[in-house]
């Protein structure tokens, strides 16, 4: 009976079906707002791994395609008219894959972040980084205050000369040294690692520039070889376009000569 029941199990989802379900699941994550706790962050790192793996599978070629390709190779050697269903299946797989790839890219963008979207995980890690930084600042301030207390205790012990003041000063110096060591350690970077994720997820910086004054930026970069070469290519393209359009050497703009070349075709 168990064997009979086993034969009734539904088939494993295909790569396309998994990708489609991941897109739907991503909407569920991104529509409910910022992450609320560490467990959600860890769970989302695992989900991000699944989305990236699914996208890589689709980019490399859906595995199910190979089954149809193998069938087509066998059919070509026998009956050609049986190829049509497999060709249609290949077209459908290719169309679904092409439609899913931008959705998977957007799912990863919404989770990991980009120029346009902060990203759920990026937002969580950024907030956690801020908390770690605040903790490090608090440790630094506590160490500075302990050092001031130790200095005052040493001054008092030097003036009074009593054993009690000397003991108090020694304890204050030791306490200040411990706090200074704790504050001197590099603050930990926030990161999240799910149980199924291969590595922890942390924030990476990606710098980019926005040109707000093209004239000023142009003056600054005018000596750059890439700017000079790019400018020359752009001017050459414009001059070639004018030569083809005007077809008259007398109409060439300043600094440009139009040349006509004839060849047999």
Image (spheres, grey):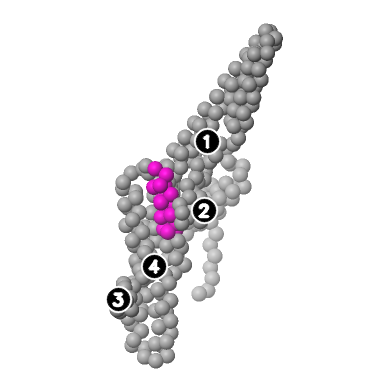
Location of mark 3 (residue): 5
Q: CA–CA distance between discs 3 and 2?
A: 39 Å
Disc ID at residue 199: 2
Whether the magenta-drawn stretch holds residue 38 is answered as yes
Whether the magenta-drawn stretch holds residue 62 is answered as no
87 to 221, vertically: above or below? below
SS for dot 3: helix
Q: Nearer the viewer, mark 3 or mark 2?
A: 3
Q: Earlier in the sequence, mark 2 or mark 4?
A: 4
Q: Residues within 10 Å of mark 2 (few under 14, many from 20)?
A: some
Q: CA–CA distance between discs 2 and 1?
A: 44 Å
Q: CA–CA distance between discs 3 and 1?
A: 75 Å
Residues in magenta, as a range: 37-52
Q: Main secondary structure of the magenta part?
A: helix
Location of mark 4 (residue): 15
Which quadrant holds the N terminus? Answer: bottom left
Disc ID at residue 216: 1
Q: Earlier in the sequence, mark 3 or mark 1?
A: 3
202 to 54, vertically: above or below? above
């Amino acid at each position: 009976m168990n064997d009979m029941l086993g034969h009734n199990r539904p088939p494993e989802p295909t790569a396309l079906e998994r990708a489609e379900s991941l897109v739907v699941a991503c909407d569920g994550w991104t529509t409910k707002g910022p992450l609320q706790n560490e467990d959600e962050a860890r769970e989302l790192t695992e989900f991000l791994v699944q989305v990236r793996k699914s996208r890589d599978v689709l980019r490399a070629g859906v595995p199910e395609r190979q089954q149809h390709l193998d069938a087509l190779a066998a059919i070509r050697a026998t009956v050609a008219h049986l190829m049509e269903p497999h060709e249609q299946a290949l077209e459908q797989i290719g169309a679904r894959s092409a439609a899913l790839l931008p959705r998977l890219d957007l799912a990863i963008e919404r989770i990991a972040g980009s120029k346009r979207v902060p990203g759920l995980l990026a937002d969580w890690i950024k907030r956690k980084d801020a908390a770690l930084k605040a903790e490090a600042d608090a440790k630094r301030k506590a160490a500075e205050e302990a050092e001031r207390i130790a200095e005052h205790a040493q001054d008092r012990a030097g003036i009074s000369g009593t054993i009690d003041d000397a003991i108090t000063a020694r304890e204050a110096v030791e306490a200040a040294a411990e706090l200074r060591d704790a504050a001197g350690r590099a603050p930990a970077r926030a990161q999240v690692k799910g149980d199924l994720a291969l590595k922890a997820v942390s924030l990476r910086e990606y710098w980019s520039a926005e040109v707000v004054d093209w004239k000023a930026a142009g003056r600054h970069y005018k000596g750059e070889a890439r700017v000079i070469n790019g400018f020359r290519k752009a001017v050459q393209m414009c001059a070639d376009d004018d030569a083809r359009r005007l077809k008259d050497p007398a109409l060439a703009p300043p600094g440009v000569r139009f040349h006509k070349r004839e060849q047999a075709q």
